[in-house]
Image (tube, helix red, strand yellow):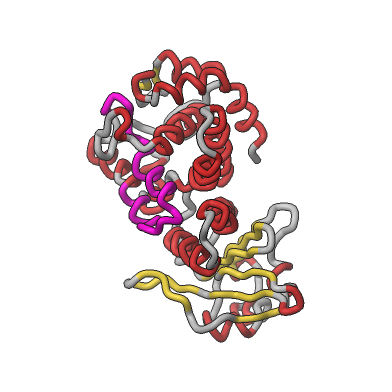
Amino acid sequence: MVARTDGAAGLVCDIYTQGSSGVDRIGSEVTMPEAAIFYLIKAEEGATHVNYSDRGGSLADFQAQFPPEIHQTIGTIRNMTACRHGEVYFVAFNYGRPVTAQDSLFLKGLALPGSFLAVVAGDVQDMSKSFLVMVKTLAMATDSAGDNGAHVLRMNEYARALAESMDLPERFVKALSYSAQLHDVGKIYIHPDLLEKPLRLTHHEFDLVKKHTLLGANIIGDSPLLRTAKNIALTHHECWDGSGYPAGLTGDSIPLEGAIVKVADVYDALRTMHTYKPSYSHNDACRIILEGGGDGLHEIRPAHFHPAALQIFGKISHQFDAIYHAAP
């Protein structure tokens, strides 16, 4: 569900469902008092998650917390995640499993582009179309916890800082800074146990993980509104020297947005501890990117990166460190 405030009318809501044919709007707009859902979203976090089983009451008791306008459209509600950005609410109901705080963080990370698609698109006047595009991405994502919310938000800031320092057009920078967070959206279809396996992946397992680039591009779709996001999802693991995936692209055949996000993604991956690798200091992460080295599982070489992006990264790497420490 996507809801927006509309003055005295309260919240005007569009409710969507995911089916075998895609994402469809259910019924017409629903109007309800803003207070009906605002209390569910923690003001200090901007996101929340609720399972009826966590409340200690019956399923019937849980239903009483939701407005009848929602029940009439959705039916029985078993769980939900919700977040707010500005005057727009994003709510996902009835996951196929108990929801967690990570689900709400992931929803929050994906919701940010929904609020800013008009900025990205520039000349798009019909906001309902842009919301529909974002809702499709959200709906495809609701059955998986996804990546850590702080990581996807940092990716926006890394990409923006690098693109601005490369003196790229303002329109490109804006699109990049709202799209970078969708780089790994395809991982929602990769089993978490595989993504966090503490040992080296087998060739078969790595082939499965590599498919997240193709899956992500498929999830985002062909809308012109999200062309930058699709290019990023598809190409942020391509390498300048042709040793990357999924297509083994080389040099300028790699979209610039993908090449920029590659630098950001490698830096953040080096800084972040996972079950399969330690975290690296800022200085060590920069050394590995600029001079070459390994993260315990992968060999990283300067030849992997767009030369201009790599050069600028070396000059502004202190901004990356500040972004890493500033993110929640």
Task: Give coordinates of residue 33: x percent, y percent.
Answer: 72, 78
- Any part of residue 103 in sight: no
Decide if residue 218 is on the left or right side of residue 290.
left
Image quadrant holding the N terminus, namely: bottom right
Nearer to the camera, 186 or 207: 186
Q: Residue at x 49, y 28 (%)?
A: 267
Look at the image and say whether residue 209 sits in the magenta stretch: no
Q: Considering only vertical position in the picture, is 45 above or below 263?
A: below
Figure quadrant of residue 308: top left
Task: Give coordinates of residue 51: x percent, y percent.
Answer: 59, 66
Look at the image and say whether residue 233 sits in the magenta stretch: yes
- Any part of residue 216 in sight: yes
Which segment did they paint magenta? 214-243
Decide if residue 111 is on the left or right side of residue 211.
right
Q: Main secondary structure of the magenta part?
A: helix
Q: Considering only vertical position in the picture, is 316 above or below 114?
A: above
Q: Residue at x 44, y 64 (%)?
A: 136
